[in-house]
Image (spheres, rainbow, N blue to C red):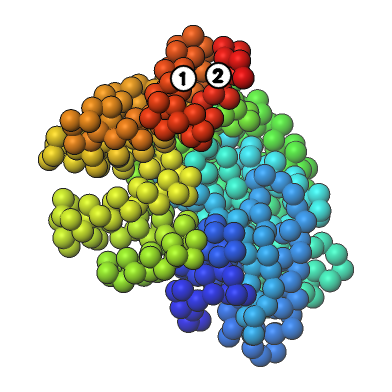
Amino acid sequence: MTVATGRVVAGRYELSKLIGQGGMGQVWTAYDQRLDRRVAVKLLRPDKVAGQEADELRRRFVRECRVTAQVDHPGLVTVHDAGSEGEELFLVMQYVDGADLSDHLAEHDPYPWQWAVAVAAQLCAVLSAVHAVPIVHRDLKPRNVMVKQDGTVTVLDLGVASVMDADTTRLTHTGTPIGSPAYMAPEQAMGGAVGPYTDLYALGVLLHELLSGDVPFSGSTALGVLHRHLYEPPVPVRRIRPEVPEALEALVLRLLAKDPQHRPDSAQEVYEHLALLLPARGTPTGAPLDPTRPFLRPHAPWPDRARTPAHQPAPVAPTAEKPDVARAVDEVKRLLGEGRITQAVDILGAILPTAAEQHGEHSPVVRTLRKQYAATLMDDGQYRRALPELRRLADERAAEAGQADPQSLRFRYDAAQCLEQLGEPAAALAEYRALLPYYENQYVSGGDPELAHDVRRRIGHLLLSLGDRPAAHDTLARLLLDVERLKGPGHPLAGEVRRTLQWLGQVRG
C-alpha cells in the first residue's frame, strides 16, 4: 500500500506520518484541515479490499466504525469520522498524546507493580464498557494501549472486534484466528467461540508482562507460541519478582487459566480485586505518564502543568530523512496563510533540530525560525510551550545587544503574556513591572510610550486579580490621566480604563 505524505483524504484529512501498519491497513497521524487539529486516520489496504473477500472486509470495516463509535468511555479512543474514498476505506479517530504501553514498559524496568495494578484497573473499566455492548476486543496488547501524559489509559483499535451476534463467525472468519499470538487465549487460538473471558486472558498476559518484563509464553513461531498457551502453565510472577503481592500473583494466574470457566467472571470482578491493591489517595509523584495518578487524585487538575516542560516537538516528518528546511519554511508560510496554525507549529518544531545542525544553533536562519516558532505557538494558544522559547530568545538577544534592546524586551513582553494566559498573575506582574522602566524611558532604545501604557494597564488588571484593589486603582487612575493628557479623553484606552475605575467605584461617570 503506497500512500503519500500530504495526501488529503475525504477533502479534509491531510496525512502526515505513518505510525502503524498491520493486516487491516495503515494508521497515520493527520491534520483535520477544517478544524485545524491533529487526528489519527486508519486506511484499509486496497489490496485487501480487492478479490473474493472484498465484501466481507468492507462489512467488517463498516461494523468496526459503528461499534467503536457507539461505546462511550473516556478510556476508549474517540471516533470522529468514517467513510470511503474510491477503493479505500478510512476511519478518523482522536489523536492520543502519550506513550504506548510497550514503550512505557521498556522505559521503566522494572515496571512498578503499583503501576501495573493501576493500568490493569483502568483497562478493566474500559473492558466493562466494551463487553456491555457486547463487543470482544480480541486484540488487547501493549501496542494497543496508550498511557497519556496525565497517567490515564486509552485503548486503541477495536478493529478486530466484532459484535457478538449470529453473524460473528461468518463475518470475521478468514481462515486464521484474529489477534496476536503472544496474547491469544487458548479458545481463540483453537478458533473456538470467544467472549469477554477471552479479553480477560489477554489482560492476564499483559499484567504478567508488566510485572515480569516478558510475556508468559514466547517462541520462534506463532504455532509454537499457541501450543504453549494451550498446554504449558505460566511461571508465577513472584518467582521473578518476589516483591509482587501474593494476591496479585494469584489474580494473574486466574486470568491465565486455560479453561475460561476458571477465569474471573467479568472485568468488574477483576477490578474489585485490583482495587484492594491500588495506592491510597494522596499526592502524585509529579511525573507525567504515571498510571497511578488517576487513582491518587481522581479527576483532579494536573499540578505538573504549572511547570514548563522542555520543548518536545510533535511528530510530523513523513520519513526518516531529514526535512528540507527551505521547503519546510515555504510550507509553513502557506499553512499560516490558510490559517492552519497547528500544522505549521508542528512543522516548525520538527525542522528546528535539522536547521540547527545545518546552519548552527545561533545562526540567523535558526534564530528566525525560533522566533516564528514562538510566535506561532502563541497564535495556536500553546502558551506553555511558547514560554521557554521566548525566555531563551530574550536572554540570548539581551546577551548580544543589552537588556534595553527592543527585540529582547518584546520577547519578555510576550513571555509575560504567556504567564497571564497560564494563570500565573504574580509571575506576570513581576515581569511587566521589570519591563515598564525600559518602555517609559524615552532615552533608552526600548522606550515606547504606547507599550508603556499597555503594560501599565496590564499591571492594573493583574493587581485586581491578585486582590490589591487600592494599588490597582492607583495604577489605573494615573494611567488615565496620562492617556487623556497625551491622547485626549476620547481615546479608546482612556475609555477602557475609565470603565474599569467606574466598576471599582472610585470614579463617577
Crowding near pointer 1: few (<14 within 10 Å), some, many (20+)? many
Q: Secondary structure at mark 1?
A: helix
Q: Nearer the viewer, residue 111 or 295?
A: 295
Residue at the spot x=48%, y=82% of the render?
2
Q: Which mark is residue 392?
A: none
Residue at the spot x=52%, y=70% of the render?
14
The amino acid at mark 1 is Leu
Residue 279 visible in rendering: no
**Residue 386: x and y, percent?**
38, 43
Residue 492 visible in rendering: yes
In the rendered image, the residue lying farthest to the left is 400
Horizontal arrangement in the rendering, residue 476 relative to residue 140 (left or right): left
**Mark 2 highlights which residue?**
501
Q: Nearer the viewer, residue 239 or 118?
A: 118
Whether residues under marks 1 and 2 lie with C-beta atoms below 8 angstroms apart, the answer is yes
Examine the rendered structure and indicate whether residue 221 appears above or below residue 50.
above
Residue at the spot x=47%, y=57% of the render?
341
Residue at the spot x=69%, y=85% of the render?
54
Q: Secondary structure at mark 2?
A: helix
Q: Which mark is residue 476?
A: 1
Horizontal arrangement in the rendering, residue 50 relative to residue 351 (left or right): right
Examine the rendered structure and indicate whether residue 86 appears above or below residue 77.
below
**Residue 257: x and y, percent?**
67, 47
